[in-house]
Amino acid sequence: MSVDIKAEKVIIVMPAYNAALTLKKTIDDIPIGCYNEIILVDDGSIDRTVEIAEQLGLFVFRHPKNIGYGANQKRCYRLALKHGADYIVMLHPDYQYDSRLVPIALQILKIGICDVVLGNRIRTRKECLKGGMPIYKYVFNRFLTIVENIILGQNLGEFHSGFRAYRRKVLEMVPFDKNSNGFVFDTQFIIQAVHFGFTLGDIPMPVRYFKEASSINLRQSIRYGLETIGNLLIFCFHRLKLINSSLFIKE
């Protein structure tokens, strides 16, 4: 699938940290003609990520020091909106997510089925574990996704994917600048998208866990899980008008 340059603009954003070994492989797998621009935001990498990105002709914005995954995404989305994106794909440059699926996600957005599309790595337990996903991550992912589906009224196969595609209006409506600078940014964004009435869906995606792929450790996973539950409670309390959370107020 190719894009009509005159009619719409597709920008792929990559929140990067020490992705020198996987960046080119990720880029090479993206089908030619399905995007207009790639923006890479480097979060203080100490390897050759920036150098390689510039060699590949990407638009590069560099943070002088590491300020967090959520902060990185905030910069990605601000730049994408500033550059005039109509559709935005967030893709980790660590080759963990199959970038061949970019045009599939875009097509779902373009024909109006969904406003947000996520990559779903959780198709079967056997496939996840065979693909290298640590068993504790699989268990945490399954538990949190079940809870999130129940509370948010969704039916997604996975909420914790690093492959996401959005229509422009989602980024314009969701007050993502109020979110955490840490890993729970992703959860907060999805909860906000639900709150503002956007339609979510997912597409199946192979599991890729290997040494060079980025991944949070057990301690970080536990913290992420607790923060996810905490933000779901905030959502519930806000809906019940017991609190007035700024996460769900568009200024």
Image (spheres, rainbow, N blue to C red):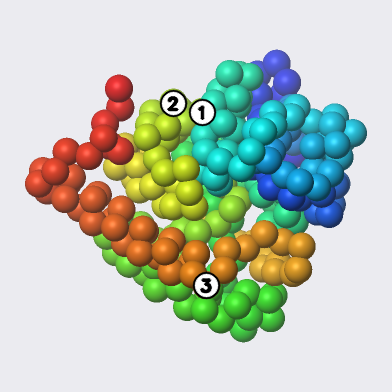
Q: How many labels sit on residues?
A: 3
Q: Quadrant of the N terminus?
A: top right
Q: The residue under label 1 is which amino acid type?
A: Arg
Q: Which residue is mark 2?
A: 172
Residue at 54%, 26% in the rendered image: 78
Task: Indicate which disc, 3 or 2, sits on the residue closer to the N terminus.
Answer: 2
Residue sitting at x 42%, y 35%? 176
In the rendered view, does 111 fall on the left or right side of 236? right
Real-space CA distance between mark 3 and mark 2, rounded to the nearest whole angstrom: 34 Å
Q: Nearer the viewer, residue 107 or 175?
A: 175
Dot 1 or dot 3, earlier in sequence: 1
> How many C-alpha atoms fall within 10 Å of the one at disc 1: few (<14), some, or many (≥20)?
many
The amino acid type, in three-letter code, at marker 3 is Leu
Residue where numbered disc 3 is placed: 218
* Mark 1, residue position: 168
Q: Disc 1 vs disc 2: which is toward the camera? A: 2
> The C terminus appears in which quarter of the rendering?
top left
Side of 249 relative to 29 (left or right):
left
The image shows residue 30, relative to residue 11, as above or below, that is below
